[in-house]
Image (cartoon, rainbow, N blue to C red):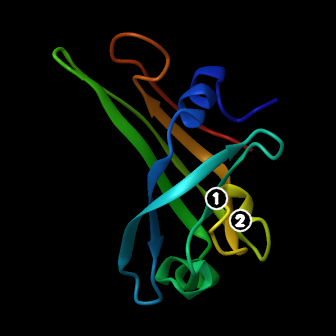
Amino acid sequence: MSAFTPAEIAYLRGQLLGRLATVGPNGQPHVVPVAFRYSGETDAIDIGGYDFAKRKKYRDVRGNPRVALVIDDVPSVNPWRARGIEIRGVAEILETGGERLIPSFAPQMFRIRPRRIVSWGVEGEGVSRNARSVR
């Protein structure tokens, strides 16, 4: 059974870019745009990039694997309608697989296992909010 609802999975599969929050060794938060993919096989979020192991987010996760990822958009402005998902969890560093996300990506990647999911506007029309802890 998935940690995500069917509507959340459909939304994740329709998006390409999110914002990843990590925490540096000095406690300072760091937020960056990232490419991601939902993996139905692992029920997790995979994140990769160019020269991935050289980036601050990679160093941050080595020291503190707790992360948050937000994927959101505004499909309608009249009437205003926002939708998105916040995924809090633990990022596992994998030394291979990043090039499967996008062929030009580095082999290193993160796999985020969700511990808390908050979604809004994904389950249909109107303002719907769904928050829950998982696993």
* Residue 23: percent from left, percent from top: 45, 76
Element under disc 2: helix
Residue 31 image offset from top left, x and y in percent: 38, 67
Q: Secondary structure at mark 1?
A: loop
**Residue 92, percent across and down?**
72, 68
The tally of labels here is: 2
Task: Work out whether 132 lies above or below 109.
Answer: above
Name the residue tied to disc 1: 102
Closer to the camera in the image, 51 or 125: 51
In this orientation, which residue lies closer to the viewer: 102 or 82? Answer: 102
Determine which quarter of the picture holds residue 33.
bottom left
The relative height of residue 50 versus residue 38 in the rendered view (above or below) is below
Going by the numbered disc 1, the residue's amino acid type is Ile
Rendering coords of residue 16 (x, y %): 50, 45
Q: Is residue 41 above or below residue 29?
A: above
Mark 2 residue type: Glu
| Residue 10 higher or lower than 108, as above or below | above
Residue farthest toward the left in the current orientation of the protein = 78
Quick one: 119 or 32, which is closer to the camera?
A: 32
How far apart marks 2 and 1 lie (CA) works out to 5 Å
Write the residue at 77% across / 65% down.
97
Q: Residue at x 63, y 30 (%)?
A: 9
Q: Give the labeled residue for mark 2.
A: 99
Q: Are marks 2 and 1 in contact (CB under 8 Å)?
A: yes
